[in-house]
């Protein structure tokens, strides 16, 4: 019997629709599925301990032998709600960032926005996602994923001090008029196959058709208000990987390379994907 493909997914709410078929639907048992932080999935794909990973898109430039599985992504087109920069200063005055140590794409996005939109090159240090400690060590704190969803994006103070809150999805959209792609399924170019790609896309289709079920299960599991989960998954997060998303991905990687935040990537490689019943 052939070994199951090892798949590393991300342990954030925004990935639930993508993996619902693998965890609860027809694709259950097709893969050897595990859950990690985005940065850990990237490292495991680099090391070869998984065959497919839901990885931060900046890793496409850092792992040139990696290709995108076409069909779906984790993206936004405007405010995303789960990528928040909480700052003691206006963005244009920030001199130092504390970035969530689980973040790679969003950390680079923050630096692209600082340089291209505000003319700044602040210092960046990685930090566990604890807002108090982050704001003690830097002017601004980048918080992503589930920890960001627990913050109030409209807050104007934190622990008695004034703060500014920036949604980086909105900041990118205002600067580029494009979506922002945060993560994609990826595999080594030498080891991808279209049957696995079709199964990943089928899992996403299964989940996107069952948002009511996901809202009920995930709001209870994470202790989030159901309304927040529904709005987030239906209005903030996008799961497409179409022409506009690909254009945004190319722009993001080009800007990252221009700022020496990643190696240049002339073109984004894609694995073939055929429609297949799994």
Image (cartoon, rainbow, N blue to C red):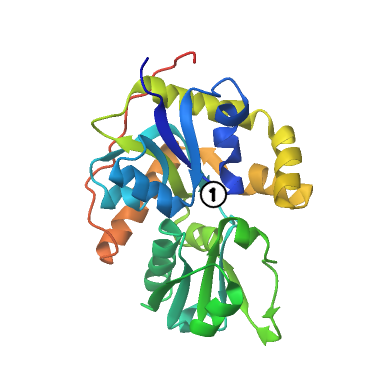
Q: Is residue 87 left or right of residue 59?
A: right
Residue 194 lies in quadrant: top left
Q: Which residue is mark 1?
A: 76
Answer whether residue 192 is visible to the viewer in this image. Answer: yes
**Eyeballing the image, is 213 above or below 245?**
above
Answer whether residue 56 is visible to the viewer in this image. Answer: no
Q: Residue furthest front?
A: 1
Q: Residues within 10 Å of mark 1 (few under 14, many from 20)?
A: many
Q: Is residue 139 left or right of residue 57?
A: right
Image coordinates of residue 54 in percent, x first then y, are: 44, 42
Q: Residue at x 78, y 52 (%)?
A: 225
Q: Residue at x 69, y 37 (%)?
A: 214
Q: Secondary structure at mark 1?
A: strand
Image coordinates of residue 76 in percent, x first then y, are: 54, 49
Q: Residue at x 55, y 47 (%)?
A: 11
Residue 254 lies in quadrant: bottom left
Image coordinates of residue 56 in percent, x first then y, are: 41, 50
Image coordinates of residue 65 in percent, x first then y, are: 23, 41
* 166 vs 151, nearest the viewer: 151
**Quadrant for the N terminus in the image:** top left
- What is the number of callouts on the image? 1
Q: Residue at x 31, y 60 (%)?
A: 256
């Amino acid at each position: 019997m052939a070994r199951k493909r090892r798949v590393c997914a991300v342990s954030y709410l925004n990935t639930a629709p993508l993996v619902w078929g693998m965890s609860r639907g027809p694709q259950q048992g097709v893969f050897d599925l595990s859950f990690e932080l985005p940065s850990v999935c990237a490292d495991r794909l680099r090391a070869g301990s998984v065959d497919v990973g839901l990885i931060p898109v900046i890793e496409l430039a850092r792992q040139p032998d990696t290709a995108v599985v076409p069909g779906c992504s984790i993206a936004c087109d405007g405010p995303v709600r789960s990528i928040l920069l909480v700052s003691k200063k206006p963005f244009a005055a920030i001199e130092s960032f504390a970035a969530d140590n689980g973040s790679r794409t969003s950390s680079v996005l923050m630096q692209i926005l600082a340089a291209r939109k505000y003319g700044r090159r602040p210092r960046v240090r990685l930090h566990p996602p604890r807002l108090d400690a982050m704001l003690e060590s830097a002017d601004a704190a980048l918080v992503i994923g589930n920890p960001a969803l627990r913050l109030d994006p409209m807050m104007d103070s934190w622990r008695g001090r004034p703060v500014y809150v920036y949604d980086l999805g909105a900041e990118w959209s205002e600067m580029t008029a494009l979506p922002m792609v945060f993560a994609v399924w990826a595999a080594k170019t030498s080891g991808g196959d279209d049957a696995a790609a079709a199964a990943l896309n089928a899992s996403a289709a299964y989940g996107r058709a069952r948002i009511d079920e996901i809202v009920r299960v995930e709001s209870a599991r994470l202790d989030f208000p159901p309304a927040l989960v529904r709005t987030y998954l239906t209005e903030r997060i996008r799961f497409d990987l179409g022409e506009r998303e690909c254009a945004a991905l190319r722009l993001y990687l080009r800007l990252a390379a221009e700022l020496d935040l990643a190696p240049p990537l002339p073109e984004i490689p894609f694995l073939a994907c055929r429609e297949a019943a799994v």
